[in-house]
Amino acid sequence: KEKVEITKEQQALMKVIADAYNRHQIPQDVAKKLLQDQYSAEENFLLLTEMATSQVQVLVEFTKNIPGFLSLNHEDQIALLKGSAVEAMFLRSAQVFSKKMPNGHNEVLEDRIRRSGISEEFMTPMFNFYKSIGVLHMVQEEQALLTAITILTPDRPYVKDQQAVERLQEPMLDLLRKLCVLQHPQKPQYFACLLGRLTELRTLNYYHAEMLTSWRMNDHKFTPLLCEIWDVE
Ligand SMILES: O=C(NC1CCCCC1)[C@H](C1CCCCC1)n1c(-c2ccc(CO)cc2)nc2ccccc21
């Protein structure tokens, strides 16, 4: 049985990533708002664009704290953010969805999302992903590292210096692997499972644009930031 040890510099890296992740928390209020009332498709779409806009701003701040990110080529920094924004949004949405709430609230939240205006065909892949994240019961550090690993995906479109991105992603993957062994000793496959979620997350990328354009309403309005990052309008 290999003795897994987290080195001093890995502890420092974990602290930097976890602190940045906790500092840049999205207000959990989207769940509270959804639990308050059943909104119209138009109101829900507006809520989504507001939440997603602030999440992108939070994501940029988080990314700036990833050691080495700001030393990457500037175009590559943009390509990584653009390439990971939708996945980071679904990862964060999955974490909001999986948060244990007082009894019955989780069911109400699911029902509100089902009737929010998203077209039926996307419900299964989206909720399958949320539930597959939920059953993992990830700790904060794992969520933070998984988000950083998603951002530092070398093969995003238009990334020029992929090796430079790999050099930043590798230490995160190594640290996450050790963390999984230490946090979930009874689940040797846990780390592989987490990485499998990232593959599932990529498929949601393909659905995302259509989920927006098929939202049950006319005239979908986006903020300038979302037009930039979501390739819409
Ligand atoms: O606001 C939201 N997500 C934010 C995003 C930024 C980070 C925090 C969460 C939206 C809701 C908006 C209002 C109508 C109901 C969905 N949402 C989605 C979601 C996100 C994007 C799409 C289309 O691509 C479809 C659904 N999944 C959720 C799971 C749990 C709680 C909210 C969730």
Image: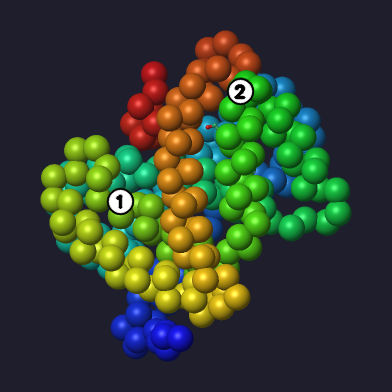
Measuring 85% from the left and 48% from the top, which residue is drawn there?
104
Give the residue type at disc 2.
Glu
32, 195: nearer the viewer: 195
Please say if 143 is above or below 126: below
Write down the residue under mark 1. Answer: 153
When the figure is inspected, residue 103 is found, relative to residue 9, above or below; the finding is above
Quadrant in the rendering for residue 183: bottom right
The picture places residue 91, in percent across and down from the top left corner, at 51, 49
Tell me the tag on residue 178.
Answer: none
Quadrant housing residue 171 = bottom left
The quadrant holding residue 214 is top right
Identity of the residue drawn at 45% across and 25% down:
209
Q: Which mark is residue 121?
A: 2
- Which residue is more in the foreground, 25 or 87? 87
The answer to whether one can see residue 224 in this image is no
Say whether mark 2 is within 8 Å of ligand 1. Answer: no
Picture coordinates of residue 29, whole percent (x, y): 66, 48
Question: Element type at marker 1?
Answer: loop
Residue type of the residue flagged with mark 1: Thr
Closer to us: 84 or 133 = 133
* Total labels drawn: 2
Quarter of the C terminus within the rendering: top left
The answer to whether residue 14 is visible is yes
Give percent across and percent down for residue 63.
35, 57
Q: Is residue 22 left or right of residue 102?
A: left
Residue situated furthest top in the rendering: 218
Q: Position of residue 58 (x, y in %)?
A: 44, 52
For the point 35% across and 86% down, the residue is 7
Which residue occupies the extreme front position in the image? 1
Q: Residues within 10 Å of mark 2 (few under 14, many from 20)?
A: few
